[in-house]
Image (spheres, helix red, strand yellow):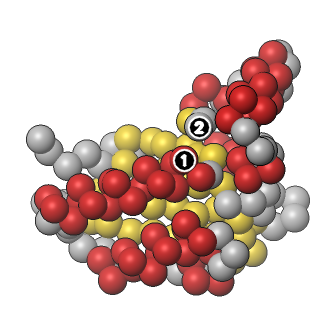
Amino acid sequence: MAKREFNIVFQLSKMKIFEVSFYTIKNNPTPHFSTSACLLSRNKKSYIRSGQAQKEVTIGFPEAYHFYEKWDKYHIHDLTRERYDEMISDLKVLMEKYNFVQYDHTYYVPFHMIVTLSKLKPKSEFKTKEKWEQYMEKLKAEAGKYDTIHSINVW
């Protein structure tokens, strides 16, 4: 099975974002792997810090920090099949821990989706999966307020 291209943005907190990507750029024959982290400005119209700020942004978020530490050495490289599978396994840990938006076959998540993601309560604020599901149902019930909520993967 082919290695699937993707871009996933994780909400670490209301102001901190961690991104993991595996995609092809322009004429490159194979996809490459990258991570980046961002600190949103207070008004959420831009970033205060972005790109290679992973170490500073992920401190205090052990799962994201561990992922960054382990995989940073493979930045902008194609991954072997074995490494790709291992990275996907590690990515599933992040998906369990943090809210995220996932796009397939594209090298960026639109900024408006990142802002929508950042407005959610972080998963860490909920003690149980059931409380998280209740929160998501409440958001979905608010007509039009979160029209892109369906794109945000939960638990």
Labels 1 & 2 near each other (Cβ < 8 A): yes
- Relative height, residue 56 to residue 105 (above, below): below
Which of the two labelled residues, at mark 1 and mark 2, occupies the earlier sequence position? 1
Q: Residue furthest front?
A: 128
- Label 2: element kind: loop
Residue 10, position as x, y percentages in the image: 59, 54
Counting from the top left corner in percent of width and height, residue 124 is at 73, 53
Q: Can you tell which mark lies on residue 155?
A: 2
Q: In which quarter of the image is the C terminus?
A: top right
Q: Is residue 117 above or below residue 130?
A: below
Q: Is 116 on the left-hand or right-hand side of 7?
A: right
Left or right: where does residue 121 sit relative to residue 111? right
| Quadrant in which residue 120 is drawn | top right
Place of residue 49 in the rendered image (x, y in percent of width and height, measured from the top left): 68, 77
Q: Is residue 126 visible?
A: yes
With 19 as the anchor, is 85 left or right in this view?
left
Q: What residue type is labelled 2?
A: Trp
Q: The disc labelled 1 sits on which kind of residue?
A: Glu
**Could you tell me how far apart the alpha carbons at marks 1 and 2 are, in whole angstroms?**
6 Å
Question: Looking at the image, which residue is at 80% across and 50% down?
Answer: 125
Residue occupying image coordinates x 49% and y 74%: 66
Q: Which is more toward the observer, 17 or 68?
A: 68
Identify which residue, 46 or 11, lies in the foreground.
11
Q: Name the residue under label 1.
A: 96
How packed is label 1: few (under 14 Cα within 10 Å), some, or many (20 or more)? few
What residue do we see at 53% from left, 80% from top? 52
Q: How many labels does the image show?
A: 2
Residue occupying image coordinates x 87% and y 64%: 42
Q: Look at the numbered disc 1 and give the secondary structure of its residue.
A: helix
Res. 21 image quadrant: bottom left
State whether residue 154 is above or below residue 46.
Answer: above
Look at the image and tell me in which quarter the N terminus lies.
top left
